């Protein structure tokens, strides 16, 4: 389990998101069309980003990373951008997130302007990784009223196995 995170929080709130295989171009198109919107909840933003990152190779041209970049808050983009730098940071610092096998979400910790979502994922090699997704409700500018990602923080894990076979799989 992640340091300081109870196990029951790590493996609850399963994510339902289908794989993008042959014949599922509509789902790929949906991911590629995803943009911040006032109608999206913090959890929906996290799910969109994770689905895009899980299918980065399938989408091609690092479009999974591009979708994730779209949902990065202006302050996050100022710290990690421009896009090429962000893309390189994801590839070098978070390679296990790209094309991961599956993920589960813990409970959402929500205030009026901030949301925190624990994410546990299984990478292509079967190793487990845990992250804290931190989102902020944008208060001004073009994205006023939209939830956007301020930070993704890797949490230490001591679990030796990932999400179970009966968990929702991307």
Image (tube, rainbow, N blue to C red):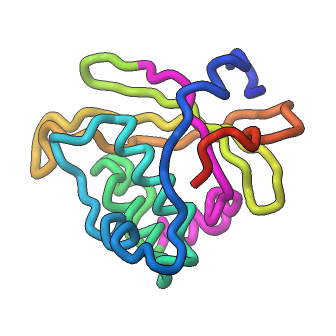
Residue 23: quarter of image: bottom left
Q: Residue at x 26, y 24 (%)?
A: 113
| Image: 141 above or below 66 | above
Q: Residue at x 61, y 50 (%)?
A: 169
Residue 39: quarter of image: top left
Question: Which residue occupies the extreme bottom position in the image?
Answer: 61
Task: Give the left or right position of residue 2, taking residue 117 as reference.
Answer: right
Task: Give the left or right position of residue 59, taking residue 78 as reference.
Answer: right
Residue 87 place in picture, x, y as percent:
51, 70
Number of marks in the rendered image: 0
Residue 74 place in picture, x, y as percent:
28, 51
Magenta stretch: includes residue 89: yes
Residue 154: quarter of image: top right
Quarter of the rendering occupied by the N terminus: top right
Residue 148 place in picture, x, y as percent:
31, 44
Q: Which of 30/118 is in front?
A: 30
| Image: 117 above or below 25 | above
Task: Give the left or right position of residue 158, taking residue 71 as reference.
Answer: right
Residue 31 place in picture, x, y as percent:
36, 64
Magenta stretch: includes residue 16: no
Q: Residue at x 64, y 51 (%)?
A: 102
Quarter of the rendering occupied by the C terminus: bottom right
Task: Give the left or right position of residue 99, taking residue 65 as reference.
Answer: right
Q: Which of 29/125 is in front?
A: 29
Give, as a single range, the part of the protein colored magenta.
Answer: 85-109
Q: Residue at x 44, y 46 (%)?
A: 47
Q: Which of 167/65 is in front?
A: 167
């Amino acid at each position: 389990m992640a340091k300081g995170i109870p196990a029951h929080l790590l493996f609850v709130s399963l994510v339902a998101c289908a794989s993008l295989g042959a014949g599922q171009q509509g789902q790929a198109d949906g991911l590629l069309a995803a943009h911040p919107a006032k109608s999206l909840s913090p959890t929906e933003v996290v799910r969109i980003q994770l689905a895009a990152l899980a299918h980065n190779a399938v989408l091609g041209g690092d479009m999974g990373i591009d979708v994730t970049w779209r949902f990065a808050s202006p302050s996050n983009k100022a710290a990690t951008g421009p896009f090429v730098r962000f893309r390189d940071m994801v590839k070098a610092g978070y390679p296990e997130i790209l094309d991961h096998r599956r993920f589960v979400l813990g409970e959402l910790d929500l205030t009026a302007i901030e949301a925190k979502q624990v994410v546990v994922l299984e990478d292509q090699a079967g190793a487990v990784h845990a992250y804290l997704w931190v989102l902020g409700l944008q208060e001004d500018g073009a994205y006023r009223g939209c939830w956007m990602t301020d930070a993704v923080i890797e949490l230490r894990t001591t679990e030796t196995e990932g999400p179970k076979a009966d968990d929702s799989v991307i």
